Amino acid sequence: MPPPPLDNQQDEDVEMVVPNSDIPDGPQPMEAHTEDMSTADVPIVDDSLSGRFTWTIENFSRLTRKVYSDDFYVGGYKWRILIFPKGNNVDHLSMYLDVADSTTLPYGWTRYAQFSLSIVNQIQSKYSVRKETQHQFTARESDWGFTSFMPIAELSDSSRGYVVNDTCIVEADVAVRKANDYWSHDSKKETGYVGLKNQGATCYMNSLLQTLYHIPYFRKAVYHMPTTENDMPSGSIPLALQSLFYKLQYSDSSVATKELTKSFGWDTYDSFTQHDVQELNRVLSEKLEDKMKGTVVEGTIQQLFEGHHMNYIECINVDYKSTRRESFYDLQLDVKGCRDVYDSFDKYVEVERLEGDNKYHAEQYGLQEARKGVLFIDFPPVLQLQLKRFEYDYMRDNMVKINDRYEFPLQLDLDRDNGKYLSPEADRSVRNLYTLHRSVLVHSGGVNGGHYYAYIRPTLSNQWFKFDDERVTKEVAKRALEEQYGGEEELPHTNPGFNNSPFKFTRHSNAYMLVYIRDSDKNNIICSVDEKDIAQHLIVRLKKEQEEKEQKRKEKEEAHLYTILKVARDADLHQQIGKDIFFDLVDHDKVRTFRIRKQTPFITFKEEVAREFGIPIMYQRFWLWAKRQNHTYRPNRPLTPQEETQSVGHLRDVYNKASNAELKLFLEDGQDFGLIRPPEKRKEDLLLFFKLYDTSNETLRYIGRLHVAGSGKPMDILTKLNEMAGFALDEEIELFEEIKYEPRVMCEHVNKNVTFHANQLEDGDIICIQKSPVGSGEQFRYPDVPSFLEYVHNRQVVRFRYLEKPKEDEFSLELSKIHTYDDVVIRVAEYLGLDDPSKIRLTSHNCYSQQPKPHPIKYQGVEHLSDMLTSSNQTSDILYYEALDIPLPELQCLKTLKISFHHATKDEVVIHTIRLPRQSAVEDVINDLKSKVDLSHPGAELRLLEILYHKIYKIFPLSEMIDNINDQYWTLRAEEIPEEEKNLGPRDRLIHVYHFMKDTAQNQVQLQNFGDPFFLVIHEGETLADIKLRIQKKLQVPDEDFSKWKFAFVSLGRAEYLQDSDIISTRFQRRDIYGAWEEYLGLEHADNSPKRSYIANQNRHSYEKAVKIYN
């Protein structure tokens, strides 16, 4: 039965006790998950040895793709820092700690270190970017760190202070520890619970999934979502979640989440992108709520998590009140400035007085003094509290993490002080007393990255557990509660006699999300969940999966007892050549595989072959394969009778030294020759294999093998070859030897009139035959074997996508890897029906992000198509195209800028694309614009501005070179210079004027700019009343709307509201200084303006990808 509604569930329910196809091949720097691992997690054998290394990098902008620091020593070990200044396949600086001498250390070496990496802010050190983590370094993972350390755009912005005078300062703090086999911990055995595997950066998801799983009522509802045995977990979110929960409940080892993320529609890039756990919680809840509609568990999400509050505005002097009821699934609570959860709730319901210039416009009553606030109508059974550990720092123009101490109680009483949080319509009979039964989700690290894990009480007992990806441990209550408050912590003295002042450090690990359960609902929510709640098809499917997994585990454990033999036959060659493969003879992964105990005599194996293939032992002859120096793989020699008396394990050990290698054999069947047994192999005999090339059909197929005498000539077997090919016996044929195909094809003509030895043929060689083209008169694309093999070797089917629709394949073309840029665009233009191929521009595919690369391919910047498709050792089959209005070679000599022109007298904005030679200056841009725009008068002068976040950051000097201007992150705006600005008096000021509104959602006070910023001239002694008249006239705002506007002097994000009588010039004392955009006259009003498309460019610098569940 599905879980009944919470209101109706019986109390008798008892508690339940229970670095890739997209990742570059080869060794790559490993990605860390920033976290704070305490000494309780790692058994320490002796004290840590620590040290700091500072790396000052000069000429930073000139660095190549991959750079190492000098070596340094910590704990007796040699380390170094590895950075990718342009990003390791991402648009972020990538940085890692590397074991400098990893290649020379003895086999099986390992070392454990806790460390942090920092980019020092050389202007204000408190804004330095620091990330910390820990790792068990091994030969396989000899470096560890952060692929997305910080955005390159932020790093390279000289105003930010991270690169000053082209110098960057990197710091590494390393503490080396010896740990007792941390990874051998058996979570199931020690705790009764299992963890979730991290796919790359999915710790945030793992902590949330563990929290949801340990809400039994929720788990039961998921089990009762309708699924069928024909569903596939990778395509069904309900089935994938059911499967995951079942494995968490019954598995003995950590559980993978790939099926679930595939059901979300995520690719590898999503799994390596860390998101916000709160955002994922909301998106997943909405998706499940939608999936539950029309089923027996419809409404479960609302029953568990939905509460309601009332927003109200109540006039003080007249009888008028406006209310709005809203629902919530979680509450965001302020951390900064609050001591604990109760302080945050007090702040949440704090009453704001609307008075003075901030009066409320009430219907029929006009502007009135009023009270504004929020009260709660009801709270949900499961209360999710999101702690606002991150906020916007206006000085830094970025988000920062709040690590202040913030307490949260084990028991939370939201009826306190006579229900001061409740609205008048709230049901006072419901006791809103909550206990932290479920979860404390912790974030460890900083704003640019970190690690998530969860402390959970799965039952009604007092025992806490830490769920940290794959590892689950028992924890005391203090670890889950007090130690997650944040704030500062004092370290004990390592040398008390040396320094009497305590060493304090900030706790970067602190609670980020709290999950409380209402006491009156706990018996319903913490209910029993067992197999009767699980669909039978799911149990059968997952038990079968477990059996297969167990079988594979057993085979792996017993692998040392067995030998794998792969046996290829003529039938395999007939089946594969010309279809699956064209070069060499066979794909060994597609032939019959035998798993034989090592001590089995080879003769016994032959008996099994006889049973499998129906080939009597007397007809069997086995050949050993050999890899030649030219990297081809051919049968080399037959096994001797003496070798066939040995065990299969001995043969494997002798002829393939690798410990886990397979023994590959070619089986000759004597029945193919119509003989009792295969002919005796004489010393001078050669085994040759033959393929037939058909020039008219452009096909290649296998036609058989022959034993020939090395002293004989190809002329002697021409009749036999014609017979094998199905030709007339006297057909003129040509012979070619297929020699190799990597890195290029080598296929040479065979002289029919000299011996096989003279043609340098040996056992296992391949001869390709074809009809002689001489005298046929026909024309073929590939007239002979070498040209056909060259074509096959280089052919490449490319999927083309229109750059504006990067997820959709539009068409495919068969091309050659050796095609030039011109060859490719000619074919694309032919397909699209375009006359001028030079107007086609191509962009490569980023295999890591599954997106187009940020910059197109330069004309003739790469030699061949193969170069266009290869990036960081990965090969793609995707190219993006766009059709230009001018030829690409011409365009590359020009600088293209998109500029929005704001007309002086008309309310219109027109986007202009300006193309000028790269050596042009801003003055040339202005002159070009003048010829394209409608000026208010012939003598009007223009200026070019740099806009970001609706603020003016720069007026470009006319002499500045345009090649230095980057419009990828900034909006470029052109406008006429007003006449009054041309004749500024000595006491006049040119100030910034920006529109803003206060974000009052959940009582969060934050200014948000919007609309078009502008300059305004203010004169000495001018009052706000005077200025308001000029602003209203400039912006053409109706009186009724303008009367609601408020005016403030804003400095560094703080608004000081102004009166009409205030002298404005006294506020703006500074002139022509850096940072003027943070001091402005603010116009506070609602944002009612239509959103223009170009404004989207303002957010181009945002590097965090939103969480999306696509299915």
Image (tube, helix red, strand yellow):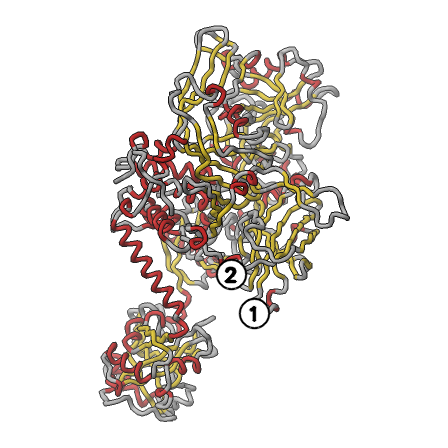
Is residue 617 left or right of 873 when viewed as pictured? left
Quadrant where the N terminus lies? top left
Q: Secondary structure beneath disc 2?
A: loop
The foreground one among 923 and 416 is 416
Q: Would you say the residues marked 2 and 1 are in contact, meaning their CB atoms lie under 8 Å apart? A: no
Residue 107 image label:
1
Which numbered mark, 2 or 1, is in the foreground of this view?
1
Vertical arrangement, residue 782 with respect to residue 704, above or below: above
x, y (%) of residue 151?
A: 57, 44
The foreground one among 591 and 320 is 320
The quarter of the displayed image where residue 613 is located: bottom left
Is residue 938 left or right of 677 when viewed as pictured? right
The residue beneath circle 2 is: 863
x, y (%) of residue 728?
A: 23, 82
Q: Residue at x 26, y 88 (%)?
A: 618
Give whichever of discs 2 and 1 has the lower sequence position: 1
Q: Residue at x 39, y 88 (%)?
A: 756
Instruction: Inspect the image, locate mark 2, and give the three-letter code of the amino acid beneath it.
Output: Glu
- Residue sticking out furthest to the right: 498
Quadrant where the C terminus lies? top left
The foreground one among 745 and 253 is 253
Instruction: Inspect the image, locate mark 1, and give the three-letter code of the amino acid beneath it.
Output: Tyr
Q: Secondary structure beneath disc 1?
A: loop
How many numbered callouts? 2
Vertical arrangement, residue 158 with respect to residue 549, above or below: above
x, y (%) of residue 599?
A: 37, 81
Residue 839 seen in render? no
